[in-house]
Amino acid sequence: MTDDARSNRDDAGWRNEALSRRNFLRCAGTAAGLLALDAIVGRHGGAEGAALRARMAQAAAGEPLGFDTTWQNWSGNLHSDPERAFLPFSRQDVVDVIHLAAKKGKRIRVTGSSHSFSPLVPTDEFLVYNRGMRAVSVDTSNPAHPLITVESGANGADALAEMARHGVALPTNVVLKSVTYGGLIAAGCHGSGWGNPTLSDLVESMDIIDADGMVRTYSEASVGAETMNAARLNLGLFGIIDRITLHAVPTFNVRHIDRMDLTMTAVLQNLEDIVTSHDYVDLFWWPFNDRIWVKTYDRTTEPVSLLPDQQAQEFAADFFNILLGVGFYEWLVQNTQATPDVSRFLFGFISPRDVVEPISNAIHYQDFIELLKVANTEFAIPVASDFTIVKQAWQAVLDIANALAARGQYPFNLTLNARFVRNSEALLSPAFGNEHTCFIEVLSYYNTPGWTRFSAMVAQEWIKLPGARPHWPKEFQQIPGIIPFLRGTLGHNLARFLAIRDGLRVDPGKMFVNPYLNKVLFA
Ligand SMILES: Cc1cc2nc3c(=O)[nH]c(=O)nc-3n(C[C@H](O)[C@H](O)[C@H](O)COP(=O)(O)OP(=O)(O)OC[C@H]3O[C@@H](n4cnc5c(N)ncnc54)[C@H](O)[C@@H]3O)c2cc1C
């Protein structure tokens, strides 16, 4: 670790300790307040009084108090009412919450930015928010192979700032900057890039706190390759992830081109050439358009051509386009017959672009996407040599959208997107065992009528394709028969994952399992 990196970590540690002390003082203050209140009002009766006294005793014993809250995810399709929620600021705070849960026989789930669409988070017991722990440090002691260490609550923006300071980057990532690394790694998230695996595959090591409150370090060197491949995508089932070290690269520039002039037919005909002749290819179809958006970016030694003015203009344009989009989609979900016209009109707002820019700009090419809420189902499809399965998956969406449109139904109104990555080594990854994987997804505006039926129809076609599997954080719970399908398709890998988890005895009492994951993986 460099001195810089060490001093950042020390700063972070100091900050966390200070925050933790503040947290402690807040708890002590609350406890004193509650005691005073109790002295004033005397003995309380009923359930409220009992709860108050229990919390006073907890505070007096120095236990984390937590707070009352309800939880819902970003897109609003999932809700829960946890008994208590906690915001730890340090590793010790996390250990305290785990000890409290053990003492009270409670289960714990963790949430980051709550952007997942599938029920990975919901719990009615203890919920831990990871955003209190967000330190980031960069180690450039080996300049060709830099490492970035993030606390689990650090999000994309937190990490980007620190990486930029050190001239390093991750070669792939999700477009959003607001999601946390705990969430990204636990759920096996991916970006784009023919030569890039998923983010979980970039993990060099991870510290995870188990059900006894013990910190365990996972790396290939310390636990071996197979156990590491279970830990790197663990859906939060190994415990609470404290910090993660990822392989980064020295930053580099890419030539980033957006084209809207190609017809979908031409792109599908030449799919293999297009995808394999670029470092990164993303395809987007706005329903009922003849043309599609082809985004490519390729590593280059050319200098950055994106001028600060242009960047500022694009930033402003992104904002206004998203606001315009929200306005149109709010209207559209009440007037679904207009979907083909609105979809063609909005596609016209996407501008062609050809610039040289740093890789991080290209990856996080769109700001403000969180302002437009969506529903989303995504599958990983193996890329066979001639891309046949990918084309079948793409065609299935067109066929279903057209068949429903012929009946006057328009549940699909945002985009069909395909990205291409390398295989994953993570046992539970839907991209495991492939040479390359196409992550394909359908998105509609979040309250579009008929979405659940439409996405289930699409998924039922995708499931028929050899090797197709749902992506963990996207909606798959609506797909009929998905649980037996998942257990079947994960097969040996699921058995290995569970055996490794059992063998490590990280969570013998299923403290970190929520009801949905229990049904999917354990029942
Ligand atoms: C608009 C949008 C765009 C997206 N684009 C992409 C994309 O390009 N590629 C992609 O792969 N995904 C994408 N996603 C999905 C998103 O990246 C994942 O849902 C990711 O998990 C969200 O991170 P989060 O911080 O919100 O985690 P959450 O959704 O809060 O949690 C996800 C999982 O991580 C677990 N977890 C979080 N922190 C910890 C911890 N400290 N210890 C143990 N477990 C933990 C949770 O328990 C849960 O199981 C997108 C989502 C949205 C809404």
Image (cartoon, rainbow, N blue to C red):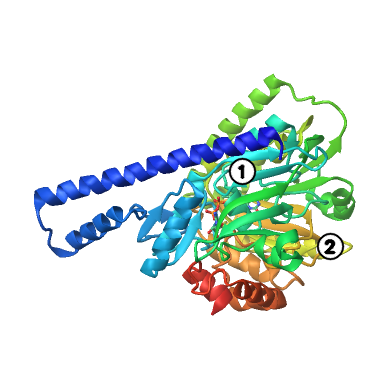
Who comes first in sequence, dot 1 or dot 2? 1
Residue 485's tag is: none
Callout 1 amino acid:
Leu
- State the residue position of label 2: 435
Callout 2 amino acid:
Glu
Residue 176's tag is: 1
Q: Position of residue 299 (x, y in %)?
A: 85, 38
Mark 1–mark 2 CB contact (< 8 Å): no
Would you say the beta carbon of the disc 1 residue lies within 8 angstroms of ligand 1?
A: yes
Residue 435 can be seen in this image: yes
Query: Which is nearer the eye, 257 or 329?
Result: 257
Q: Secondary structure at mark 2?
A: loop
Q: Position of residue 253 (x, y in %)?
A: 81, 33
Judge whether 359 appears above or below 383 on screen: above
Query: Which is nearer the eye, 158 or 113?
Result: 158
Judge whether 310 appears above or below 452 on screen: above
